[in-house]
Image (tube, rainbow, N blue to C red):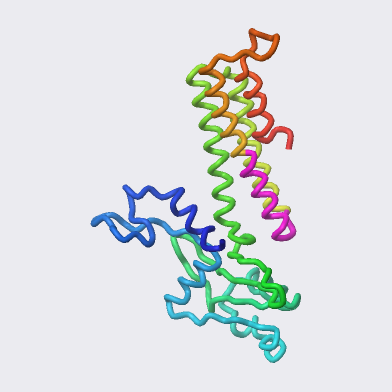
Amino acid sequence: MSALEHAVPERFFNDPSQCNLQGTTTPIAGLPDCPQGISAVKALGIAAAQGQRIYTITQKVYNDNPNIVSNALSAHSWDTQNRVQQSLDAGYEVTIHERPITESGWTGAGYLAIDSATGAGAYTIEGGGNGGFLLVVFAIALLIIAAYFAGSLLAAGMIGPIGAILAIGGAILSYFNLVKGLGEVQNETQFNNLVAFTALKGLASILLSGVTLVFYNSLISVGPITNVLPFSIVNFGIFFFSGWFF
């Protein structure tokens, strides 16, 4: 699942006609390599390919070397060292590469913090929890698509200017709420909930825009109010889910 956090956005945002996708067996001569997504396992793989040491710090290793974070991982940022230290103090087993990597404009660390008793844990990249960097990009992309759909409906005459302003404004408001929330989250659970909820609002708006198209084309009326078309009600749904009430 950690690998999907880099593989899915790579397919979603890269155009194979403009660049060669990672892992393609039929690269097109003359095209550059596509930018790579980052996940915890991807970061570890890149570091290993560079010849870096990959440390698996068990509780026994940590107990025998209580200063291992400041000594062996001194090349990493203070934030990464602090998170690793907290994970070790909480009893987790941590797997991390020796020093930061740089890939496609991103620099940082990817590491695993696992409860050896249950196998549960976090696959984390620097700057966010559990693949958070790409999750934020994905959520923002959904909001952009939602705003674009609302603008397209306006251009096609399927919703009015007020409806478009509400939908596009809601997407913009959701974006600023996301940015504001990212500065206030205290842990990985809050981070994941914030990003997932933002993505859900964008997706709901996109789906409702699709429903608007169906209703508009069929011209189905709503109950006894024969002069009110369903797309008017769906437009309110777009307004609602785009973020004004959350």
Question: Is the stretch drawn in magenta largely helix, strand or loop?
Answer: helix
Residue 57 location in percent, x, y?
63, 82
The image quadrant where one finds the N terminus is bottom right
Residue 226 location in percent, x, y?
65, 8
Residue 13 location in percent, x, y?
45, 48
Left or right of 176, for residue 218:
left
Left or right of 241, for residue 49:
left
- Residue shown at 66%/21% (left/top)? 233
Q: Is residue 87 depicted above or below 176 in this figure?
A: below
Residue sitting at the far bottom = 64
- Residue shown at 68%/69% (left/top)? 120
Between 95 and 187, which is closer to the camera in this rendering? Answer: 95
Residue 67 location in percent, x, y?
68, 86
- Residue shown at 68%/35% (left/top)? 243
Left or right of 245, for residue 49:
left
Q: Which residues are magenta?
A: 185-201
Q: Quadrant of residue 144?
A: top right
The image quadrant where one finds the C terminus is top right
Magenta region includes residue 2: no
Q: Quadrant of residue 34?
A: bottom left
